[in-house]
Each structure stands twice: as structure tokens, then as C-alpha cells.
Amino acid sequence: MYEFISQGGIVMYVLLALSIVTVALIFERSWSLRRSVVVPTRDVAAIESYIRAGDVKEALASCEKNNTAMHRVLWVALKNRGVKRSVMKEILEERGRQEVAYLDRYIGILGVIAAISPLLGLLGTVIGMIEVFQVISIEGVGKADVLAGGISKALNTTAAGLSVAIPALVSYRIFEAKVNRFVVEIEEHALHFVELLKGDRE
């Protein structure tokens, strides 16, 4: 493995660093985007039952002791329950944008890694091929084993670049879709709570 990496030169070390970042981000996002820490359905149902019972203080207390995106949005709704419906919706939209930015953090980095890794691999291959042609200019084309070995080394970075890019791209798409689903759910719950709090009143 060390020989494989060292043959690719500095480009291979950059790809190795990107692969470590990719794995770390995949684990971090998988942990942070669990349903239980974004939209805990059971807690939302409990808060709704408090509101239906007229116990707003208990609903607020439940939101304050749970640090999830859904709880933070509902806390804002409960704190601003005295304002007009249109104003409350604007406040919740603003809070929602903040939560989306929070959920989206680091996902863009996976997209960037997926985009640049194949290019870095190609750059390493081009550099390796230049070295092969330099050998040809000195040694000639008579030594097929030397040329084959040089070309093989040059292609190592392309293989490494694709090995980093593919899981990064797949993870990026999965996490992006997951965040979009959570955003839709949060919006639905927030609008439902606006109706619970305001009813037909302005």
C-alpha cells in the first residue's frame, strides 16, 4: 500500500488526505442526521398533546430541554404565539432557513471532493505520463517492461481519484436527499403547530 501511494507522488498524498476527510464527514453526517436528533416524532406528538391540553409552559419546557432542529422551530412558534399568523409564519420561515443551513453543513464539502478527486487523479496520471515520455526520450522504446511499469504507476492516481470520488458523490446525494426530506417534514409540523396555536384567529 505504501508503495502504491508513494508511486503517485504528491497528488496521491492529497487524494489520501481527501479520502480521510470523506470518511470522517460520512460518519459525522450519518450520526448528525439521524431522525432522533432532527425530527423526533414521539417528542413532537407529546408537545402537540400539551398544546391541545392548553399546557403551553410544559410544551416550552419540552422544547428547551431537547436540542433538535424540530424542537428549536417549535420553541420559536410557542414563544411567538401572541403575534399574528402571517408574522408567525415569517418568523418560522426565517428560523427554518437557519435550521436548513445547520443541517446542510459539511455536505457541500463532499460535493467538492467528489468533483475534484477525479481531476486530481487525472493530473497525477498526466504528470506520470510526462515522466514516461521523458524516459522514452532517453532510453527509447525498446524496454517495454520499463514503459509498462511507468504507465501503470501513472494510472494509479486515476484509480485513486475515482475511488475517492465515487463514495463522496454517493454520500453527497444521499445526505442531500435526507436533508430535503427533513426540511419538508419540519415545514409540515411547523405549519400544523401554527394552526394549533392560532386556529382561525389572527
Image (spheres, rainbow, N blue to C red):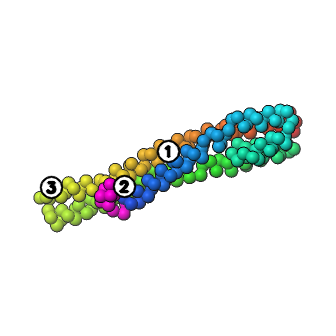
| Rendered position, 187 above or below 3 | above
* Mark 3 neighbour class, 10 Å CA radius: few under 14, some 14 to 19, many 20 or more: few
The answer to which image quadrant residue 33 occupies is top right
Q: For the residue marked with disc 1, what is the amino acid? A: Ser
Left or right position of 35 against 157? right
Distance Cα–Cα, label 2 vs label 1: 20 Å
Identify the mark at residue 121; answer none if there is no mark. Answer: 2
Verify whether residue 76 appears in magenta. no
Q: Bounds of the magenta span?
A: 1-11
Q: For the residue marked with disc 3, what is the amino acid? A: Ala
Q: Nearer the viewer, residue 153 or 62?
A: 62
* Mark 2 neighbour class, 10 Å CA radius: few under 14, some 14 to 19, many 20 or more: many
| Residue at the spot of label 1 | 171
Q: Quadrant of the N terminus?
A: bottom left
Q: Give the residue drawn at x 79%, y 33%.
A: 49
Distance Cα–Cα, label 3 vs label 2: 24 Å
Identify the mark at residue 144; answer none if there is no mark. Answer: 3
Q: Nearer the viewer, residue 146 or 131?
A: 146
The answer to which image quadrant residue 187 occupies is top right
Identify the mark at residue 3; answer none if there is no mark. Answer: none
Verify whether residue 10 appears in magenta. yes
- Sequence-wise, the earlier of marks 3 and 2 is 2
Q: Give the residue drawn at x 70%, y 34%.
A: 42
Q: Give the residue drawn at x 16%, y 55%.
A: 145
Asked if residue 86 shows in the view, the reply is no
Question: Percent position (x, y) of residue 161?
Answer: 38, 52
Disc 2 secondary structure class:
helix
Q: For the residue marked with disc 2, what is the amino acid? A: Gly
Q: Quadrant of the C terminus?
A: top right
